[in-house]
Amino acid sequence: MAGLKPRAAPPEADDESADAGPPGVDVSAAARVAGAPWLTAPRARLGALRARGAQGLLLHGPAGVGKWDLAMAFAADVLCESASDSTPACGHCASCHLMAAGNHPDLRVVVPDALAERRPGGATEESDGDAGEAAAASRSKPSREIKIGQVLEVADLSSVTAHRGGARVVVLGPAEALNAPAANALLKGLEEPPPGMIFVLVADQVDRCLPTILSRCALVRVAVPARAVAVQWLQTQGHGADAALRLAEAGGAPLAVLRESEDHLSGELRDLLLGLLRRGAALEPADIAARVPKILPIAASVALFQRWGWDYFAYRMGGGLRYHPSDKDVFEALARQWPLAAAGAWLDRLRDLRAVAEHSLNPRSAIEGVLLDYIESIKAT
């Protein structure tokens, strides 16, 4: 890669085994998602751009629509020894087996440490600092930035011939997570990419990417699918009657619905919290104390409250109810009692709580607190 100096390989590591480890990239899942109907056109676009010789590609669009899975599936298409520009990876050749094992020598996945599960092996990268610095880093919260050292590591891939004799692929994202030095280093590689090297960048917020990087990439937008298409697809993935509701809660992003997390609200808990919100001014502190369970996911609960607040603002401004279309009567009653300024202050409180939701908070106390604030904000004059 022009402008980047390759780093020496660590002792006792060779090119074939340096990235060995348990699979950190579920290629089969990526291929399954990339086969979703709303991704057909973007995938064809990627193939067409590759056929025209494009070496810098940037997938952009809202979070949760499948961009990362599409990028990984496209990487498999490029590296497959049987596929062409217009056909998907075969899944059977040696290259596809290496992809499935998370150990393809001609692929580099560059993500922040906070998204380490996306790397082959799911490993957290360490800096070249001393043991004390490494220990301090291990105790700190994983970085959400892509740093220059990670981009310089890509030089190891660009400085050698492709192991399998074909292309080499770098999948990097989110591109907006590149810090300034890393973005400048990547820019040098995009300006003069080595023959056979393809960069696939992924961005949720393309407007936050360095304009010079955007100018050197072919942009491919991945939009939120039509509601009916997304619901039907979710049903094929195992979601039944709750598919439409879960999709609405996820803002129309199907992959956000599929994402399994300890923060997921069960249907029973979601109904319980919504029932408390629907009571509005009639809600009493004693009801909150009696019904809020001791253990519940803070982030997901706060997200549910935020959707309630956003729908309230939409209703007051004459818009439709995006998340709670069946609660029009409830919002009409709330509109007669809940001042917009007080509702805005409550949403600010929720935003602040969500920012620290990963800290060691008492879940019950935190949720009881915001519900008590909800009552007080409704009764504000």
Image (cartoon, helix red, strand yellow):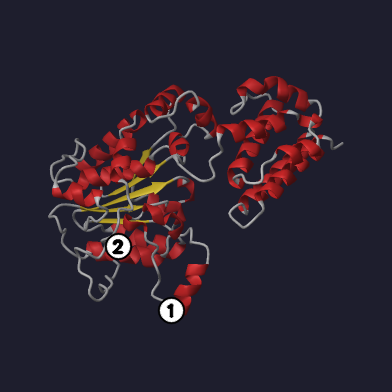
Q: CA distance from mark 1 to mark 2?
A: 24 Å
Whether residue 307 appears in this view of the structure is yes
In the rendering, which numbered label is found on residue 131? Answer: 1
| Residue 118 x %, y % | 37, 52
| Residue 3 x %, y % | 30, 67
Residue 188 in the figure: left or right of residue 210: left
Dot 1 or dot 2: first in sequence order is: 1
Which residue is drawn at the image coordinates 75% and 29% (left, top)? 279
Quadrant location of the N terminus? bottom left
Quadrant location of the C terminus? top right
In the rendering, which numbered label is found on residue 155? Answer: none
Amino acid found under the numbered disc labelled 1: Ala
Residue 305 in the figure: left or right of residue 92: right
Q: Say which of 7 and 248 sits in front.
A: 248
Q: Which element is circle 1 on? A: helix
| Residue 315 x %, y % | 68, 26
In the rendering, which numbered label is found on residue 154? Answer: 2
Quarter occupied by residue 120: bottom left
Residue 270 in the figure: left or right of residue 73: right
Which residue is drawn at the image coordinates 53% and 33% (left, top)? 251
Q: Which element is circle 2 on? A: helix
Whether residue 52 appears in this view of the structure is no
- Mark 2, residues whose alpha carbon is within 10 Å: few (<14), some, or many (≥20)? many
| Residue 70 x %, y % | 33, 41
Amino acid found under the numbered disc labelled 2: Val
Quarter occupied by residue 20: bottom left
Which residue is drawn at the image coordinates 16% and 40% (left, top)? 83
Residue 139 in the figure: left or right of residue 305: left
- Mark 1, residues whose alpha carbon is within 10 Å: few (<14), some, or many (≥20)? few
Mark 1 or 2: in front is 1
Quarter occupied by residue 11: bottom left
Which residue is drawn at the image coordinates 35% and 46% (left, top)? 58
